[in-house]
Image (cartoon, helix red, strand yellow):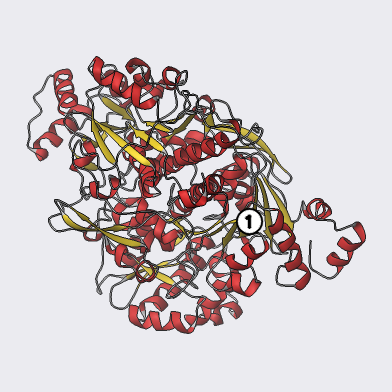
Amino acid sequence: MTTDQTRTALDGLVVIDTSETLAGSMASSLLADFGAHVTLIEKPGGNVLRSQPAWPFWGRGKNSRILDLSSTEGRAELAELGRHADVMIDTWRPGVAERLGVCDADLRPFNPGLVYASITGFGREHPWSRLRAYEPVVMAKLGGLTSFGNLTRREGPSFVSTPYCSFSSAQLALHGILAALIEREASGLGQWVEVTLAQGLLAHDPWNWLLQVLIARHDQAFAAAPPWDVERLAPNSAIMIRLMVGLSADGRWMQFSQTTDPLWAAFLRATDLEWTRQDARLAQGPGSEEVSIRAEFWDLALSAVRSKTYDEWLAVFDAEPDVWAEVFRDGSELLHHPQLVADSRTVTIVDPILGPVHQPGPLAILDGMPASLVDSAPALGEQRRPMPPTRPDPDGAISPRRSPAKTPLGGTTVLEFGTFFAAPYGATLLAELGARVIKVEQLEGDPIRNVMPFPELGGVKVLAGKESIGVDVSTPEGHAIAMDLVRRADVVLLAFRAGVVSRLGIEPSQLREVNPNLVVLEAPGYGVGPPYGNRPAFAPTMGAGSGMAFRNLGGSSNRESGLDLTTDNVKREAMRLSAAAMSVGQADGFSALAVATTMLLGLLARCRSGTGQTMSTSMLSTMAHVLSETMVEYEGAAPVALVDPDLLGHAPCYRLYRCKQGWVFLAAPNPSDRSALGKELGIELGEDNDALTDVLSSAFASRTAAEWEELLTAIDVTCVEVASQTTDATIMFGEAGRTLGFVIDAHHALLEEHPRLAPLVRFSRSTTVVGPSPLCGADTDTVLEELGYNDDRRTQLRQAGVIT
């Protein structure tokens, strides 16, 4: 397709979405935003998501087609649509598509170019595969709800409302779809792609599972400990003070993130606590091995934060840019964040029925092929856009342009400039898809390598499959090396605060002067300009500033606040807020997944148009999409469902219950589920929520959680035993991770053999790659030799401090 024919990146692609889940809807939404013709297949009564306030956002730009798949005619019509589609998305339980006659194997003989994407809960070959994959069901089985157990003062797991599995698996599905479409440009063939909600959750954790590896191997030197000593009200590690939650003098909760040493030094200056560095008792402060010293230092830091109002803190932040804290937001407040407003990251689309609907803009900005956001969600059965004409070739495939590679991204080179996890892990995911990823590191290495007490441990996951070269890009010689790499790259990832790329001479415009066909992605925390582009952004700040923490706690009303809180109460609430913004899933993971999606989108756009792209995402704007359930504003919008104060669930038939032994999560939201449940229990399930909760609580207390799961899943009522251990223990070190195929073994120069996640996307034809994690500069000589730098020249550069 030529440039003048392509108005948007995906213009002309035909997508059939049969899903009724948030994961499927989110995946097809991005495709629709960037010009694909997306038809949503709806049952006669309509998609279940239509009842949600965010439907105008989830359905925007799509067409609706009503099909009764219980009828022969409906199934035949769906099969005919699939025979002429580029992409088909299915979120049914394993076996359903086969029963309907519209699975990949049914359609491929008629449409070899089809990319068929399945989003399942746990894959296809495990006892859990038969479960209906509701978000909290997946979280329960993986230990996610147990990982959030510290959100309440009661014992047991906690229900959380952030769609950790759904958003993440939607992004993984997009990785598979976009990569398969890129590969199709070479082979002319489509393929089947499968991702799981479970692996979407597992993508988040940067290093906790490796801490468990370290503890198991060196149990005499290291001991497992939770982030906080709840009894003594003290942090158990320095990182929890550097990622401190504090209360301002006027009662605003604030999240600091002073992760690196320079940022921490700036915090001590701003809080007048520099004297502690010379104090015999407090010199080690947050890192002291004595719990009493850590507690004392935390007292000092909390008091310093509480000595100023929020507005006074804003003045401090202006004077000291390396000190920063986000205020905790609630509901849809993120849509009015000064940075999103400044960057025009929100849009208002007029719905024919609801009127103006304020909502997030596209997940990514593509300067050359911007998203087209015009239409709100369709009415049931409404088809606003005509179907693109059927291709002249009968098999629906395209003509190959080059010989296909074994991996989807074989022959693609990604050049990465950036630190930590939120953007760099996106490049890691492209390495799993076969891209060559060269990471340009500062001479001392990416700070994430040393963020944990054991060297290199923090960087193992985010560095997997990459080549590392240590180059001081700020020097003329180092900059010349970077430009040599840019000339040979397909994608450049830039992940810095505003102003850094300009200082280093690697702005997108400069890079594309060197290589006009380049795909460049800027992926900062806030943005590339004012008002907050130069602020340090980490997962906790984004979890607070986006509203995710309050969402998990049931809104701002379900937490302690006020000017009269005692210091102990401030500490207890700070621990809850910290856990609500982090734990098993966090903004870094969400953002990295979106970064990978955007780079793949840019590569596909280049394949289809022949030109490069300058693109941008941000952690902040990504979180607006993650929290899309709450990120719509229009007159008459229904309230979003909130978790109850005890963080057990949304309703009597969609919540946690304590059993004779253990806990279960019951997901029986439909009338048929309730009927089957009541019949099995021998009771009538009334409409009074409080009374029904009491009845079910009493019933579940009569048996163990394991017994209830066996009994109720046998009649297809979704009720699962909640894993008693956290996600790390359940999946990375438990039998489930291996039997599900989610965990494999890898080797590291320092850690030697260790468990790691298997690649997160499965393809029917293409292979994926599991590469080692390099030490800093491990590949400097190899890469520079490819560029023509001989031994003598490399020695000169090393002696001059330009390379490692």
- Residue at the location (28% across, 26% down)? 718
Q: Is residue 244 above or below residue 61?
A: below
In the picture as drawn, the residue positioned furthest to the right comes out as: 792
Query: Can residue 233 be seen in this snapshot?
Result: no
- Residue at the location (42% across, 20% down)? 107
Q: Position of residue 584 (x, y in %)?
A: 44, 46
- On screen, residue 237 versus residue 104, left or right, reads right
Q: Position of residue 349 (x, y in %)?
A: 25, 57
Say which residue label 1 marks: 416
Q: In front here: 184 or 204? A: 184
Q: Position of residue 505 (x, y in %)?
A: 65, 71
Query: Can residue 733 be seen in this snapshot?
Result: yes
Q: Quadrant where the C terminus lies?
A: bottom right
Q: To which quarter of the image does residue 216 belong?
A: top right
Disc 1 secondary structure class: strand
- On screen, residue 23 versus residue 612, left or right, reads left
In the picture as drawn, the residue positioned furthest to the front comes out as: 392
Q: Position of residue 736 (x, y in %)?
A: 49, 28
Q: In front here: 146 or 226? A: 146
Q: In front here: 584 or 787? A: 787
Alpha-carbon neighbours of circle 1 within 10 Å: few (<14), some, or many (≥20)? many
Q: Is residue 757 above or below residue 6?
A: above
- Residue at the location (50% across, 78% down)? 321
* Tally of numbered discs: 1
The amino acid sitting under disc 1 is: Glu
